[in-house]
Image (cartoon, rainbow, N blue to C red):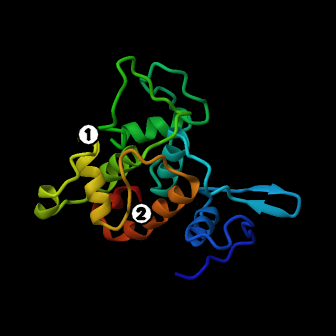
Amino acid sequence: VSKPQVSVVYSDMIDEPEYNAALTMTELGIMSGTQIGSDTYFYPDKTVSRGEFLTMMVKSLSVPVDEALSYTGYTDEVPAWLKPYLAAAMRAGLTAGLPVSETGVFGAHESITGGEVAVMLNNAMDLAVSTSSMDEMNTDEPEWAMAAVTAMNENGIAVTATQVMTRGQAAEILYRVSQMAKDIPSLAMYQ
């Protein structure tokens, strides 16, 4: 994959394997960096929150967002910028199967894990898991994430349920999903 034609160069990503993904996500308006002096930084090792990833996922899948929608059903205070994206994700069924706290908290500012990423993306992509993979599922993974994590890994998106996602990893995952989107029938509804 060649580097996209964008005017930004991330000073902290030059030798990183996620460099092309970060540039593509920037070109698509999904992610951005921070300008400090004459350099732009992506901060690939910075963790990604649940709210940030959900917003990036909704944007990258082109899920319709209605800015007027703000009801999420969660009991904690969801930031205003996130409400329309969370409402859209809920309406599209992307948050189904995520573990819910007893108090109904979304935790928008908490770091997102590979399991949560896998569940949301698998809700969108509806990837099948082969019978042999079902038999070999990692029983160390939480039950709620086991099938989704297996589906992601079987389809070339490496995640583990307890892994905390970084910006570099999120860029790479969303880039791969955007490349897969044209071949996944369930994503056609968002295109």
Q: Residues within 10 Å of mark 2 (few under 14, many from 20)?
A: many
Secondary element at tag 2: helix
Tell me: 116 left or right of 54: left
Q: Looking at the picture, how far across and down is residue 68, in whole percent?
A: 55, 33
For residue 126, say whether it is visible: no
Vertical arrangement, residue 59 with respect to residue 70, above or below = below
State the separation of the CA atoms marked 1 and 2.
21 Å
Tell me: 71 left or right of 155: right
Asked if the residue under mark 2 is in contact with the one under mark 1, i.e. CB atoms within 8 Å, the reply is no
Mark number for residue 128? none
Vertical arrangement, residue 85 with respect to residue 173, above or below = above
Q: Looking at the picture, how far across and down is residue 51, in whole percent?
A: 53, 39
Q: Looking at the picture, how far across and down is residue 86, in whole percent?
A: 47, 37
Residue at position x 45%, y 29% in the image: 106
Residue bearing the label numbered 2: 177
Question: Which amino acid type is marked by label 1?
Answer: Trp
Question: Which amino acid type is marked by label 2?
Answer: Val
Vertical arrangement, residue 142 with respect to residue 107, above or below = below
Residue at position x 42%, y 61% in the image: 191
Mark number for residue 144? 1
Q: Nearer the viewer, residue 11 or 162?
A: 162
